[in-house]
Amino acid sequence: MSFKDYDKKTFIADSARDFAARRISKREFLKKIGMAGVGLSAFNVALLGNTRRDRGFTLGSDAMAQDAEVNKWLKDVSTPFKGTKIRYTSEATPPTVVLDKLKGEFTEATGIEVEIEIVPLEQVLAKATQDVQGQLGSYDIYYLDQSWVATFSQDTIDPIAYYKDKPDLAMPGMDWDDFSKPLVEGLAMYDGHWVGIPFDIPIMTTMYRKDILEKHKIAPPNTPEEFLAAVRMITEAEKANGMFGTGLQAKSGHYSLECDWTQVVWNEGGSIFGPDKKFKGNDEAAVRGLQYYQELLKNAPPESTNSTWDGQWQMGASGQVALINSWDEFFPGWDAADSKVKGLWEAKRPIRGKVYRTPAEAGFGEIPNAGHQGGSILGLSKYSKNLDAAWIFMQWACSKDIMTRCTLGGGFAPMRLSSFSDPRVKAKEVVGPGTTRHLPVVKEIIDNDMASEPDMPLWAGFSNNEIPVNLGKLLTGQDFGGDAKKCMDTIAAAIDAAVADAGL
């Protein structure tokens, strides 16, 4: 299917609005936007029609202290823009939720009003697409899933170039080199220039109950083999006490199951696609990964096949499991004031396989590695009617101080290197609400282990339909008789046919 640029964006916006109004199914919506060249990346596709759980975001006194130098700059630079109103729409990412709580400080210092509209992801896509299509300027700043960056690259202003072109509006100490290089390259750049600024990065981490591992004299696992051995040992020893070795996000037909599957495939030396753009999930390495996952499932709570990441997080919070290889965003909630497992979980770099395929050995920009990631950026709209006021806000929102305070409010991974080493963040590397004690590990993962799923327009549909639907049938015994190879051959036939039909 081919589109003129205007017609393509009309099609995307109409499809997103139809899904938001429930006139079409999620499957049909993903198929439509995939045909138009837009996908959804890790962690975000399953948020369609929903939002992330708020796992205890809180603004303590350490997160409320304002940077005096930045505040002075805001007051000085904003004089011509007092009374202006800027708009930003986003899904409920952790930094957006915290930023929404901090925006009053910006308004107080500048007189610029900020409206942050938090809506489900499909509505974010519809609003942004409609805005750029008509060059309306209804929104001044866009939230962009990393897989939308190419589509919107012509509709945003390169922040590096604008910073240089507008020295009278340049925030002192912005320090662009302070943004994590892997995040800039993996999220924010397209065709050699910045499309926006990195803003959010959930990433897979290995987390373990130190008390349980110590009880059974088990060392924290570093490899898939060690992880499985520990999981089996703990299940055998603790099942009578209501505890399993691990818990999975293995809900049939859900994107969370695809995330789990992708990681075990990579860890076994496999990939989703090959350089010939054929599906490789049914080759020897990938099938071995799925068989490994079947073994994990035998040592996980039965509700794992009906659990997404929220259910998996709850297994950790309730004391039901001892080892999890999943999203770093889980960790702060387990240290919450009312948590049953406060102080008992530890984080480490994710378990690593013996060898990983290189991007050249995979396909569609896939990067096999140990740390499955999914992130987003903020983009400054070319069509903003309040461009300079929005630019002042965007610099403030992505400044060292605010990025650090967002981290303090939620305990999630920051985009800036300085936030990881900020004394306020280091001071919270202790057990307690809003803990940051997992962040040194998260930084290591971002720097060394970051992995990305394929970057292709049909991927959103495959990762939410063909793959997890058939995996669910295998894992729940509805089909394939427990045969991992048979399941993956079925998926391969469907995906290869769709890729060929799309001319990819």
Image (cartoon, rainbow, N blue to C red):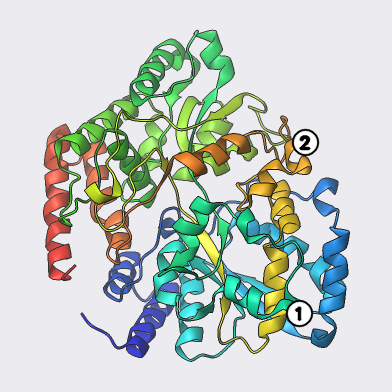
Residue 377 location (% of width, % of height): 54, 64
Residue 185 location (% of width, % of height): 46, 57
Q: Quadrant of the C terminus?
A: bottom left
Q: Please give the name of the residue rendered at 13% of the width and 49% of the height, measured from the top-left corner.
A: 490
Of label 2 and label 1, which has the lower sequence position? Answer: 1
Question: Against 331, is 319 above or below?
Answer: above
SS at badge 1: helix
In this rendering, does residue 440 appear at all? yes
Question: Against 298, is 414 above or below?
Answer: below
Q: Which mark is residue 168?
A: 1
Q: Which mark is residue 487?
A: none
User: Which residue does the numbered mark 2 point to in the structure image?
Assistant: 427
For label 1, the crowd category at 10 Å Cα-Cα, with few meaning under 14, some 14 to 19 and many 20 or more, is few
Report the amino acid beneath label 2.
Ala
Q: Of residues 54 and 225, which is closer to you in this image?
A: 225
Q: Nearer the viewer, mark 2 or mark 1?
A: 1
Question: Against 482, is 90 above or below?
Answer: below
Report the amino acid beneath label 1.
Asp
Residue 21 location (% of width, % of height): 44, 76
Q: Of residues 457 and 213, which is closer to you in this image?
A: 457
Q: Give the side of residue 40 with respect to residue 3, left or right.
A: right
SS at badge 2: helix
Q: Give the side of residue 140 with respect to residue 358, left or right.
A: right
Q: How many marks?
A: 2
Q: Quadrant of the N terminus?
A: bottom left
In this rendering, does residue 48 appear at all? no
